[in-house]
Image (cartoon, helix red, strand yellow):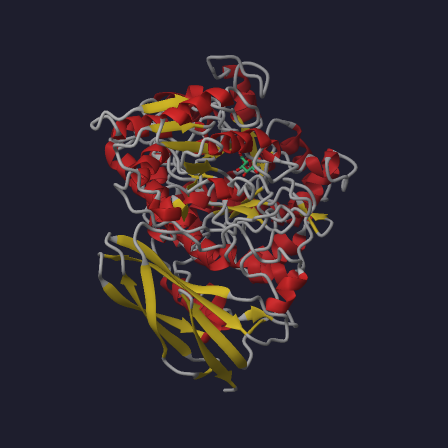
Amino acid sequence: MKVKTLTNWSGFVLLLLFLTLWSCQNSDTSTSTTKANPANSNPAIQQKVKELMGKMSLEDKVGEMTQMTIDVLSVGEPYELPEPHALDEEKMRRVLVDLKVGSILNVGGHAYTQEYWHEIIGRIQKMAMEEKPSGIPVLYGIDAIHGTNYTMGATLFPQQSGLAATWNPEMATKMAEVSAYETRASAIPWTFSPVLDIGRDPRWSRLWEGFGEDVLLAKRMGLAAIQGYEGDDVSDPFKVASCMKHFLGYSMPWSGKDRTPAYVPERLLREYVMPTFQAAIDAGARTVMINSGEMNGIPTHTDSYILKDLLRDEMGFKGLAVSDWEDIILLVKRHRIAKDHKSAIKMAINAGVDMSMVPIDTDFPILLKELVEEGEVPMSRINDAVERILTLKIELGLFENPIYPMSDYPKFGSKEHSDIALDAALESIVLLKNEQQLLPLSDQAKVLVTGPAANSLNPLNGGWTGTWQGVDAKYNTPNKMTILDAVRDRLKVSRTVVEFVEGTNFTETINIPKAVAAARRCDVAIICLGELPYTEKPGDIDDLDLPPAQQELVQAIAATGKPIVLVLAEGRPRVIREIEPKAGAILMGLLPGNEGGRAIAQILFGDYNPNGKMPYTYPRFANTLLTYDHKGTERISQEFGTDAFRPQWPFGYGLSYTTFEYSDLQLSADRLQADGTLEVSVKVTNTGDRDGKEVVQVYVADKVATVTPPVKRLREFDKMELKAGESKTVSFDIPIQQLAFVGRDMRWTTEPGDYEVEIGGLKAPFELVEN
Ligand code: BGC
């Protein structure tokens, strides 16, 4: 039986009122939906939480606040589990029954089958509910971040940066809907997704896990994903709880290396880092994961300003805050802010951590219990945390249905789902260059397919695929096509020659002379380059340039004079300044997932007209890593150096096989007041001979402001489809409050003065006047 969500109308009305008032003050979140933030708002759920709390001992409670990895329930040493995986009944009993651990996460090394997930989570739930006196089910969590990537045969979508490149929020919703379905089909009700960290540093190893560098794009995509994961009722057997990651400032390590110190001034924090989270909180996101790093000298796990003042009091989050991996212990081992584990636990729990992702250390609940008994952690803090955890467990319907039968999920890994993933992959590919219309290729052309990304699914999928780092081909989905497979398949009918020589792996040359010889025999070389998958620390790099071996392959093939199509499969934009001129055409695959090979082949041969746009700036030089919305005028841009803002490709860039012309930019008024709404319209014409999709991007520049203004900011966008020769007029209503920035007093503000709207190269001025 499902727990129905009853609406507490008075609370709901108050909340709506609050949201309305709040959004008047803070227009930057005005696109968020007004779904009630769920925690504790439902009387039936509150009642059940109260009843449970009344029966729980301190031991039960600290157990609920503990999250451990499946390794500790398994035969073998944690992180070195023998194959095949097996649960260890004795260890399970120690963890689930004696320690009363309330949450388990992760996978023991690699993806399992759907059947095996059912078997092991079934056993875990049975033991927790039958042998533990409280009978509280376990909350199982997993990083299903681009589909259910830890279940064999699941549907794998583009990673978040690829979804962002579609500029189509519906794609994020669809990914999350399918992922929610297949994650629940794997007996798991909680996913650690989406990443809402803004991706403004291309050096960072997790850039691809986010929705790019722009706040508006990331906010819309994030909201869409949360809607897809949670829907309107998270107890629905096809929905999961989402987890906003990683609160707050995680994506901005000063050194570019994962989990190293970040320094984020308050204005940057408020204007660029918080809005994606705020919008998600307003939309009712259930859980949040805390930034593993430190910001401004304070590890976030001990920062009550971030975890209480901002997250709870100011932003209004009511759900569950889980730590990241081992981060309380790391307060001792990495951050050196606590002298021992016990004081680290005290700091973190008192600062606002509700659940600790321990993940293998069994001391946490024991030491936390001692701290409460010694009066070092107040019981009220424990009760807050446990109430949030129980609320979520009840909302997810775990007490009634800890797992649903597999037969309820006939669409798991189905064609219906992979067709949706293919659509997303197609929309995610960005055409960066196409000189003399080298693309699309004729199916009569003899092609060489070469390069390390040519014949593997891994560089198309990236990290968190089958395994944490995503490099082990053993767990790839059978029958999915690499780029080479898909090109061969496409040219089957025309029986055109397809040669394949690897040439290099990701970092070392293998057989470049053989690739050159093959290129000589062909009409065109499709060179597939990129990155071996990675995430987190293992993905740190010292050099943003594409590794020399791969560049050498391009130089050597270029010397043959044969036309080159570069296909990039990258988690972050690796600098390719030297080889870019050698390629007539370049396609960017932002980790398009299992259907990426098919999508790329369809685009190469013109079956699909590309329409992806860059969700971040592609740098030309590793020392010039500016985002599109950097500060300054042309003059200041020059002061950054002669190579100032001259990226390889800017944010929002992407070509099509057709051409679009913008005309007739109209503003509803040339003078507006701060409470007004600017209506902007523009005519877009498909002037080529193919149907195509175009993303209309509305930028606004605030010409003079009391805080130095960025050159421009994206303020609206819309993706539209135009038949060859067709024109459409698109219009946007932009409340002036949506142009607000964080002023000198750290509050959102707009200021009178001159502004300029820019769409598709057209510009129009308007003036904001005093009310
Ligand atoms: C990552 C998180 C992830 C967690 C659980 C951490 O190391 O930073 O993004 O959700 O592990 O696997």
Q: Is residue 63 above or below residue 426?
A: above
> Is residue 455 something one can see in this rendering?
no
Residue 326 is situated, as x and y percent measured from the top left of the image, at 63, 34
Q: Quadrant of ligand 1?
A: top right
Residue at 61% x, 26% y is 360
Residue 485 is situated, as x and y percent measured from the top left of the image, at 33, 26
Residue at 63% x, 75% y is 706
Left or right of 337 in this view: 679? left
Q: Nearer the viewer, residue 578 or 231?
A: 578
Q: Is residue 106 above or below residue 345?
A: above
Q: Most extreme residue toward the right, as rendered? A: 339
> Is residue 483 something one can see in this rendering?
yes
Q: Nearer the viewer, residue 410 or 612?
A: 612
Residue 358 is situated, as x and y percent measured from the top left of the image, at 61, 32
Q: How many marks?
A: 0
Quadrant for residue 721, please give it.
bottom left
Quadrant of the drawing holding the N terminus: top left
Residue 92 is situated, as x and y percent measured from the top left of the image, at 52, 21
Q: Is residue 115 above or below residue 735?
A: above
Left or right of 104 in this view: 639? right
Residue at 36% x, 47% y is 436
